[in-house]
Image (cartoon, rainbow, N blue to C red):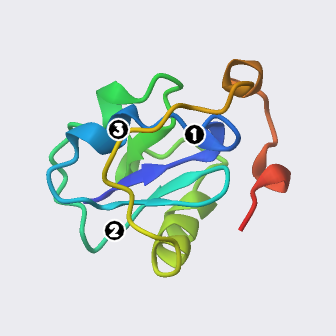
Amino acid sequence: MPFVVTENCIKCKHTDCVEVCPVDCFHEGPNFLVIDPDECIDCTLCEPECPVGAIFPEDDVPAGQEGFVALNAELSRSWPVLTVRKDPPEDAGQWDGVPDKLQYLER
């Protein structure tokens, strides 16, 4: 069961999770990260590293966030792999917990 990056990552895009991933399953977009479900080995290392609580096991994705399962799969096919930690956006703290951020997702 792969892990899924959900809505709270949009415009926060912390990359602490990337550093601990042993299989390089994270892919980076302009303002969001996704996990390739075919590469994820369910090691659980990324979930506690996310400072905004945006990563969940596929079976535990919060209600209303189920569409992010397919979105992670879709975007991981076209976005590049990210293997190193980067600084988050300067305004990341202002976006943590903001509802309805899907409208701000940049592809």
Residues at badges 3 and 1 in contact (C-beta under 8 Å)? no
Q: Earlier in the sequence, mark 2 or mark 3?
A: 3
Q: CA distance from mark 2 to mark 3?
A: 15 Å
Q: Nearer the viewer, residue 62 or 101?
A: 101
Q: Nearer the viewer, residue 72 or 86?
A: 86
Dot 2 alpha-carbon crowd within 10 angstroms: few under 14, some 14 to 19, many 20 or more: many
- Residue 58 sits in which quadrant? bottom left
Q: Residue, x 77% and y 20% (percent of image)?
A: 94
Say left or right for 44 vs 26: left
Q: Quadrant of the N terminus?
A: bottom left
Say left or right for 43 vs 73: left
Q: Secondary structure at mark 1?
A: loop
Q: Say what amino acid the circle numbered 1 marks.
A: Lys
Q: Say what amino acid the circle numbered 2 marks.
A: Pro
Q: Position of residue 24 (x, y in %)?
A: 25, 59
Q: Which residue has dot 2 on it? A: 37
Q: Secondary structure at mark 3?
A: helix
Q: Say what amino acid the circle numbered 3 marks.
A: Cys
Q: CA distance from mark 2 to mark 1?
A: 19 Å
Q: Residue, x 52% and y 72% (percent of image)?
A: 79
* Residue 13, numbered circle: 1
Q: Earlier in the sequence, mark 2 or mark 1?
A: 1
Q: Position of residue 18 (x, y in %)?
A: 33, 44
Q: Position of residue 43 (x, y in %)?
A: 15, 46
Give the mark count. Answer: 3
